[in-house]
Image: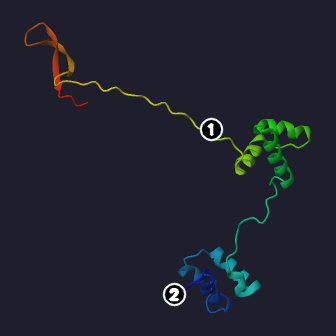
């Protein structure tokens, strides 16, 4: 049983690299694509077994990241003036620093400098009335298209009585 990804890749690459089988024949049996096998063989020929170790695809730098100096200035302004993100943006524009107010808000939020607003919920107080059996009555009325029972009624009553189910 293979323990690492490198061993799995090496299992498929070695026969191809040693010219024991052709790449086309390996593709028919291999669960990976032809492009993947070609890439693994090229990396193996260039770097050896170490080239088959999976590497992180995470970027090492972020070119559009806000500079640390600006972040520190935003935090300093927030602590000193307690202004919102939009007003801090206006203050920074006076210092010739252009940054979006949403970015300022995210920096403030990440540093934990937001005010905590708690929405107050209204509490309703329900008054329960003491009811006696038979006080809750529901009457449904059904209208009929013609006269009923040769009488002059065009509707029927369906009374229901409930035993204080509230």
- Measured from the top left, where is residue 141 in percent x and y? 21, 17
What colour scheme governs how the chains and residues are painted in the rendered image of this protein?
rainbow
Is residue 122 left or right of 56 when viewed as pictured? left
Tag 2 residue = 1
Q: How many labels sit on residues?
A: 2
The disc placed on residue 151 is none
Instruction: Name the residue that disc number 1 marks.
Output: 117
- Quadrant for the C terminus, please: top left
User: Residue at horizontal 21%, vertical 28%?
Assistant: 164
Q: Nearer the viewer, mark 1 or mark 2?
A: 1
The percent position of residue 113, horizontal first and vertical second, equals 72, 46
Image location of residue 75, percent across then percent down:
80, 47
Specify few, some or many for label 2: CA neighbours under 10 Å numbering under 14, 14-19, or 20 or more: few
Q: Going 62% across and 90% down the picture, which residue do you hit? A: 15
Above or below, comparing residue 67 to residue 41 in the picture = above
Q: Secondary structure at mark 1?
A: loop
* Disc with the residue nearer the chain's start (1 vs 2): 2
Mark 2: which secondary structure?
loop
Label 1: few (<14), some (14–19) or many (≥20) C-alpha neighbours in 10 Å: few
State the separation of the CA atoms marked 1 and 2. 56 Å
Where residue 30 sits, quadrant-wise, is bottom right
């Amino acid at each position: 049983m293979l323990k690492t990804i490198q061993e799995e890749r090496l299992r498929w690459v070695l026969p191809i690299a040693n010219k024991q089988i052709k790449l086309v024949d390996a593709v028919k049996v291999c669960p990976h694509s032809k492009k993947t096998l070609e890439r693994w063989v090229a990396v193996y020929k260039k770097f050896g077994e170490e080239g088959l170790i999976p590497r992180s695809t995470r970027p090492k730098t972020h070119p559009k990241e806000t500079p640390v100096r600006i972040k520190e200035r935003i935090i300093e302004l927030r602590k000193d003036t307690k202004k919102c993100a939009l007003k801090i943006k206006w203050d920074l524009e006076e210092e010739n620093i252009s940054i979006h107010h949403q970015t300022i808000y995210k920096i403030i939020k990440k540093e934990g400098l937001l005010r905590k607003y708690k929405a107050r919920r209204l509490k309703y107080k329900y008054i329960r009335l003491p009811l006696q059996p038979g006080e809750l009555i529901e009457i449904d009325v059904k209208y009929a298209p013609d006269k009923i029972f040769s009488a002059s009624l065009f509707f029927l009553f369906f009374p229901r009585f409930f035993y204080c189910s509230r």
